Amino acid sequence: MRTPLIQLKQVMKSFTLESGNEVKVLDNVNFSVYDDEFVALLGPSGSGKSTCLRIMAGLTPATSGEVLSREKPIEGINLDVALVFQSFALFPWETVYTNIALALKPMRLPQGEIKVRVKKAIDLVGLEGFEEAYPRELSGGMKQRVGVARAIVMDRPVLFLDEPFSALDVLTADTLRTEMVKIFLDKKTATRSMLMVTHNINEAVFMAKRILVMGINPGHIRREIVNDLPYPRDDQSPAFRRMVQQIHAMITEAMIPDAPGAHETPSPTSSALPRPPIKEPPLESLPNVQIVEMIGLLEAIGDRGGTADIFELGQATGKEYGRILYLVKAAELLDLVDTPKQMVQLTDLGRHFFDGDINVRKRMLHELFGALRIVQMTTNLLRTDEHLRVPVEALTERVAEWLPNENPDAIVEALVSWGRFAEYFGYNDDTKEVYLDVGQETT
Ligand code: ADP
Ligand code: MG
């Protein structure tokens, strides 16, 4: 039986916001990292990937559930792991050498041993000759090499990487990915296993042996995919492309369910049963995206003749995949697009919007935005005040009640920014009040 190096059991995590509201960001998360494993946590931003890492590293406690490291519950900082961050977080006034050596400071090792270990780490990540350089003299790629060396030098069995290459240019990121895989495979360091957080499907498929796909609201693990492709991997090979497409389809389906009823087959007894009462439409959450960004997406789809592949759109616009999905979700909420499978398609309304000038678009957005239930509820709330305005905290509190599993601050932010554009709501920055834009109200 393999024993896990690190294990999460039924982990739940919630945060208490300043408003006093609780947001649940992880729900019932269970997984283990075993010896000689490269595991990727793959998910859109906000799915709780970093929070998972922080919990496993002992940087923040789980709200409930168990965290075991080499079969013992962790207490405080987990000394079995070392971390590599996206932002390199180097001390600008220290050299490469001392930036790495500082990671060993708490261990109070003899000088001689520090020298040996730092030198070995420097060689492994290809920083020879840069020992005396300062961070400002280094490129992003070289800085991240220091970040990796600083983690390796600690001789911990598990390395955690949080979006380690996302701040780098494409070529540098590719090089470092290959080198990281080599460090993992060669086992010339104390590192036995790696756990990497990423939102990049290609990166996960290129590096990991096992991929845990995370879903959102609250963050949870949706699927586990074993990746047996032999190293070194070729991202152009058909097997590689297939795996990317497969994961991609899985994520798309989760975030953009087909129209209600699309999958329902009538049950044989349905005609004998009384019709269920008409349900209130579900209260939608508003994706926190800028309207202009969503309009940009609609234009990109229109420019492609009204239908586009979501994956291709992400690549063409250089946007993070999770971001594209939010934009698509926003457009879908307003009935401007449909999303059959991996495609996104302008609806008749969407086409009309695409063809329209700014006035047509504003008018349409006013109508479509006003049709959302959360907008109507907000409008009703504002109407309870004789001056048609409420403090933003009051609205945030109500939104937290309406949508208890979501981040109310983000939704209020979206309500206000969309509302402004659609000339529905306004926000007074001095009084911190949201008001009804009565100038545009037809009633
Ligand atoms: P990911 O790394 O997948 O992008 P995170 O783990 O950073 O996701 O965050 C998950 C969710 O938890 C987000 O909605 C984020 O806003 C929220 N969150 C993270 N840290 C805090 C915090 N200290 N207080 C309140 N909310 C937080
Ligand atoms: Mg993160």
Image (spheres, grey):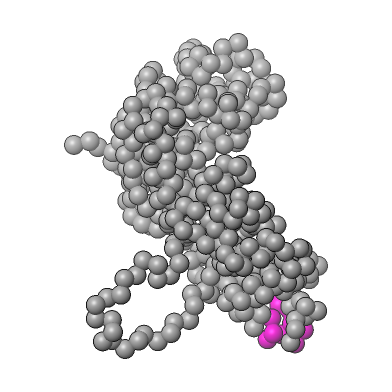
Q: Is residue 248 above or below residue 91?
A: below
Relative side of 220 to 424, left or right: left
Q: Residue at x 35, y 86 (%)?
A: 275
- Image coords of residue 252 (percent x, y): 45, 53
- Image coords of residue 319 (percent x, y): 60, 45
Q: Quadrant of residue 156?
A: top left
Q: Residue 390 versus residue 227: which sits nearer the camera? A: 227
Return the residue found at the far front. Answer: 305
- Image coords of residue 21 (percent x, y): 54, 67
Relative side of 19 to 225, left or right: right
In the picture, the quarter occupied by the C terminus is bottom right
Q: Residue at x 40, y 54 (%)?
A: 220
In the picture, the quarter occupied by the N terminus is top left
Q: Is residue 113 above or below residue 285?
A: above
Q: How many marks?
A: 0
- Image coords of residue 24 (percent x, y): 47, 61
Q: Residue at x 52, y 49 (%)?
A: 309
Q: Residue 28 versus residue 155: which sits nearer the camera? A: 28
Q: Which residues are magenta?
A: 382-393
Asked if the magenta segment contains residue 207, the reply would be no
Asked if the magenta segment contains residue 392, the reply would be yes
Return the residue found at the far left. Answer: 1
Q: Quadrant of residue 427?
A: bottom right
Q: Residue 248 versus residue 417: which sits nearer the camera? A: 248
Q: Is residue 377 above or below residue 419?
A: below
Residue 165 can be seen, yes or no: yes
Q: Residue at x 65, y 24 (%)?
A: 139
Residue 152 can be seen, yes or no: no
